[in-house]
Image (cartoon, grey):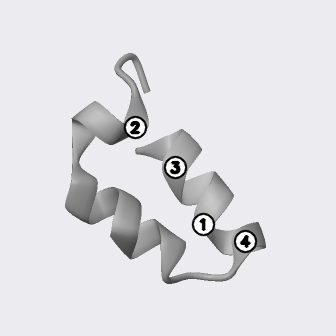
Amino acid sequence: MLHPILSLSPFRFLFALSFPPFFSFPLLVLH
């Protein structure tokens, strides 16, 4: 949460995008 999402992990970013928008946003904020 302290660092940008893209620098955190590209795979995690793509993994979150595979989820529905209402589910991916909380994941991006929490991780």
Alpha-carbon span between mark 4 and mark 1: 5 Å
Dot 4 lies on which element?
helix
Residue for point 51% across, 71% down = 17
Q: Earlier in the sequence, mark 3 or mark 4?
A: 4
Tell me where residue 3 sits by quadrant: top left
Residue matched to label 4: 21
Measured along the vertical axis of the image, is residue 21 above or below residue 26? below
Residue for point 37% across, 68% down = 14
Alpha-carbon span between mark 3 and mark 1: 6 Å
Residue matched to label 1: 24
Alpha-carbon span between mark 4 and mark 2: 15 Å
Dot 1 lies on which element?
helix
Amino acid type at mark 3: Leu
Local packing at callout 2 (Cα closer than 10 Å; few below 14, some 14-19, many 20+) is some
Local packing at callout 1 (Cα closer than 10 Å; few below 14, some 14-19, many 20+) is some
Tell me where residue 20 sits by quadrant: bottom right
Residue for point 25% across, 33% down = 7
- Frontmost residue, 25 versus 14: 14
Measured along the vertical axis of the image, is residue 3 above or below residue 25? above
Residue 5's spot in the image, x, y percent?
40, 37
Residue matched to label 3: 28
Residue 12's spot in the image, x, y percent?
30, 61
Q: Nearer the viewer, mark 3 or mark 2?
A: 2
Amino acid type at mark 2: Ile
Q: Looking at this rendering, what residue extends furthest in the right direction?
A: 22
